[in-house]
Amino acid sequence: MAIKAEHEIHNRRRGLNVGVGLMLAGFVGLIMVLTFVKITSSDFQIPASQANGVGQQVQSEEGN
């Protein structure tokens, strides 16, 4: 059996898939660049909530 030639709809779908893939890759790259720039800036500090150990068990002074 001979190999069928691709239909026009396959070419259209491939073009759309490539476009969506490029947009997704661009978005991920943008997020990575923004994160890198924010972390490497000279005024970056860990938020106070994380620095104080939020989420860890702490003994209260009320006697509970």
Image: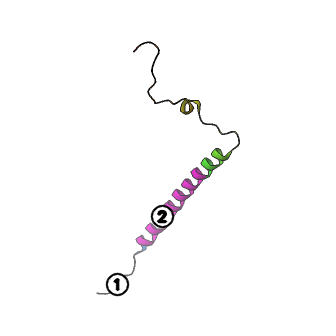
Could you say where residue 9 lies in the image, as x and y percent from the top left?
A: 41, 70
Tell me where residue 48 sits by quadrant. Answer: top right
Q: Is residue 24 above or below residue 45?
A: below
Separation of residues labelled 2 and 1 (CA atoms)? 24 Å
Q: Which mark is residue 40?
A: none
> What residue appears at the point 44 percent right and 12 percent down from the top-left corner?
62
As drawn, which residue projects farthest toward the bottom?
1
Our reading of the magenta stretch's main secondary structure is helix
Q: Which mark is residue 16?
A: 2
Q: Give the residue at mark 1.
A: 3
Stretch in magenta? 9-32
Is residue 31 shown in magenta?
yes
Could you say where residue 61 lies in the image, as x and y percent from the top left?
A: 47, 14
- Give the camera-side residue of 27 and 59: 59
Q: Amino acid at mark 2?
A: Leu
Tell me where residue 43 sits by quadrant. Answer: top right
Instruction: Describe residue 50's horizontal placement relative to residue 4 as left or right.
Output: right
Q: Amino acid at mark 1?
A: Ile
Mark 2 vs mark 1: which is more N-terminal? 1
- Give the camera-side residue of 55 and 15: 55
Quarter of the image for the C terminus: give it. Answer: top left
